[in-house]
């Protein structure tokens, strides 16, 4: 099971997911923040995956963060920018 800590406005929670993505759990004391994170990880977005060291050599993938471990980890990199919720990598 993978886990990151979440922090928003002085409150902390966590996000857990299995490598197979069968289990994805958001635990946060404030319901509105929990819903914001759940919506973010279940919404499709475009990920740019580099193919070489060149700045313009990448592939676009449309996926939801909750579809795979790779997309979850990539999606968590922009969670704060999209929701205001900090990710604390443990």
Image (cartoon, grey):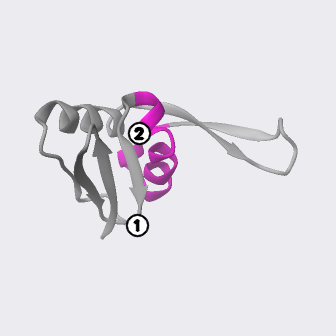
Q: How many marks?
A: 2
Quadrant of image for the N terminus: bottom left
Is 35 or 11 nearer to us in this picture? 11
- Indicate whether 24 appears above or below 82: below
Q: Residues within 10 Å of mark 2 (few under 14, many from 20)?
A: some
4 within the magenta span:
no
Q: Give the residue pinned by disc 2.
A: 64
Q: Position of residue 82 (x, y in %)?
A: 43, 29
In-image side of 43 versus 70 (left or right): left
> Where, by quadrant of the figure, is residue 68 drawn?
bottom left
80 within the magenta span:
yes
Label 2 and label 1: CA atoms lie apart by 23 Å
> Where, by quadrant of the figure, is residue 85 drawn?
top left
Report the magenta residues as a range.
63-82
User: Mark on residue 90?
Assistant: 1
Q: Residue furthest front?
A: 10
SS for dot 1:
loop
Q: Residue at x 37, y 66 (%)?
A: 19
Q: Residues within 10 Å of mark 1 (few under 14, many from 20)?
A: few
Q: Residue at x 23, y 59 (%)?
A: 23
- Indicate whether 40 appears above or below 67: above
SS for dot 2:
loop
Q: Earlier in the sequence, mark 2 or mark 1?
A: 2
In-image side of 9 versus 82 (left or right): left
User: Mark on residue 76?
Assistant: none
Q: Position of residue 84 (x, y in %)?
A: 38, 32
């Amino acid at each position: 099971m993978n886990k990151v800590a979440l922090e928003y406005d002085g409150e902390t929670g966590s996000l857990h997911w299995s490598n197979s993505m069968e289990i994805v759990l958001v635990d946060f004391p404030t319901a509105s923040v929990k819903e914001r994170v759940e919506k973010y990880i279940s919404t499709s977005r475009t990920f740019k995956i580099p193919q070489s060291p060149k700045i313009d050599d990448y592939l676009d993938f449309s996926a939801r963060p909750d579809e795979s471990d790779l997309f979850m980890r990539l999606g968590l990199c922009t969670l704060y920018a999209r929701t205001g919720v900090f990710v604390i990598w443990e």
